[in-house]
Image: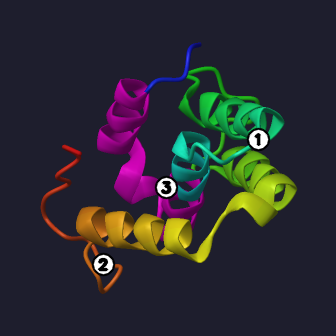
Amino acid sequence: MNFSEENWKDWLRRNGKKAGRRILTIGFELYYTYREESTPFWAKGVAVGALAYILSPIDAMIDPVFIDDISVATTALISIGRYVTPEISAKARKRVDEILGPDGGNSAGMAVTK
């Protein structure tokens, strides 16, 4: 499975609300850290690996709450945390608010267009 921005958008359309605010925020933090020019190559590899795992249609654990995805994403975020700037975190939270609504509720539309 290759990671791409389009795969990420497709995954968000299918699973965004079901996955919830925390996994989406971590996912966007990983994604934006990957896109940052100053992020070292090894950290980009960790971010891409975690995102590819999340996006993969093959699941290590069949579970309705994304436990394995959350574990992989959280471990990756801890590993590269020093490169996740406050600006990246704010951008990730803003994007999740656009998808889920600022109240964290079930906003009607998932406008995953950016």
- Picture coordinates of residue 17 (x, y %)? 36, 58
Which residue in the structure is indicated by mark 3?
A: 19
**90 left or right of 14 in image:** right
Find out whether the residues at labels 2 and 3 contact each other: C-beta distance under 8 Å: no
Question: How far, Cα to Cα, is label 1 from label 2?
Answer: 35 Å
- The picture quadrant where one finds residue 78 is bottom right
Which of pointers 1 and 2 indicates the residue nearer the eye? Answer: 1
Residue furthest to the front: 38
Of labels 1 and 2, earlier in sequence is: 1
Give the image location of residue 72, x and y in percent: 77, 46
* Residue under pointer 2: 105
Q: Quadrant of residue 100?
A: bottom left
In the depicted structure, whether residue 36 falls above or below residue 108: above
Of residues 38 and 74, the one nearer the viewer is 38
* Residue 73 magenta: no
Name the residue tied to disc 1: 40
Q: How far from the left and from the top, in percent, is residue 34?
A: 60, 42
In magenta, the rendered stretch is 5-28
Q: Amino acid at mark 2?
A: Gly
Q: Is residue 100 above or below residue 19?
A: below
Seen at 80% across and 54% down, the residue is 80
Majority SS type along the magenta span: helix
Vertical position of residue 21 compared to residue 11: above or below: below
Q: Specify the amino acid type for callout 1.
A: Pro
Quote the CA–CA distance across marks 2 and 3. Answer: 12 Å
